[in-house]
Amino acid sequence: MRLRTPARLRAIAVAAAVVLAAPVVAHQAAQLPGSADVSRVTAGTYAVDPGHTLIGWRVNHFGFNDYFGLFGDSTGTLTIDPARPGDAKVDITIPVRLVTTANAALTGHLLKPGQDGKPADFFGPAPADARFVSKRVTVNGTTAAILGDLTLNGVTRPVTLDAKFTGAGANPYNKKETIGFAATAEIKRSDFGIAYGIPMVSDAVQLDITAAFEKQ
């Protein structure tokens, strides 16, 4: 029987490692479809990608901790020209009735109707859609302050979104040019007539937004 030398065994081990690692290296080298490269943005009108656009909200509960939920399935448009980013316009509609949390009872409370002729604690069972319409965009590199009107619970107030460009490129599935943004804001729910539980449930609401738009 022929014995294998230590050197030969080491060579076999190295070859096996290379073969096993090749798929991992190839995967790591794969280029993402999108990147935070403004040169990839082309002028035009983009529509909200409802499956990948989320508005997260967060409030404090009793001073113990925060709880949060999501709005999804938004619709709307973004009109943008990279040569004149300050002229960009965004118009987004958010279906409040589709609010969700990780707890069925909490979600139910948000959509619970008022009792004995009283108004609902929060949104009620059939709330109107919310809508944000930009009025002015102040650009600073890849970030922007977007001042607009937010209509919620039938009340319209000015709100500023602190937005950041996060990526652009072609969606590999539908081939549509896509632009992504992240944004944050803070609102007071009492400004929109939703004052239940203040201060036990905080008046201040933190908004955390991730949005994708596809070129039409």
Image (spheres, rainbow, N blue to C red):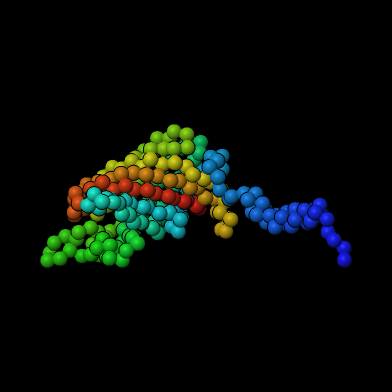
Q: Decide if residue 178 is in sight here.
A: yes
Mark count: 0
Q: Nearer the viewer, residue 128 or 164?
A: 164
From the viewer's perspective, is 9 left or right of 32?
right
Q: Nearer the viewer, residue 82 or 16?
A: 16
Residue with the most extreme top position: 140
**The N terminus appears in which quarter of the rendering?**
bottom right
Residue with the most extreme left position: 116
| Residue 100 location (% of width, % of height) | 34, 61
| Residue 176 location (% of width, % of height) | 55, 54
Q: Nearer the viewer, residue 177 or 144?
A: 144
**Is 84 rendered above or below residue 215?**
above
Q: Quadrant of residue 67?
A: bottom left
**Residue at figure coordinates x 56%, y 48% from the top left:** 34
| Residue 197 location (% of width, % of height) | 18, 54
**Is 104 rendered above or below residue 205?**
below
**Residue at figure coordinates x 44%, y 41% from the top left:** 164
Q: Nearer the viewer, residue 149 or 118?
A: 118
**Residue at figure coordinates x 34%, y 56% from the top left:** 69
| Residue 180 location (% of width, % of height) | 48, 47
Q: Decide if residue 151 is in sight here.
A: no
Q: Quadrant of residue 23?
A: bottom right
**Residue at figure coordinates x 36%, y 52% from the top left:** 56
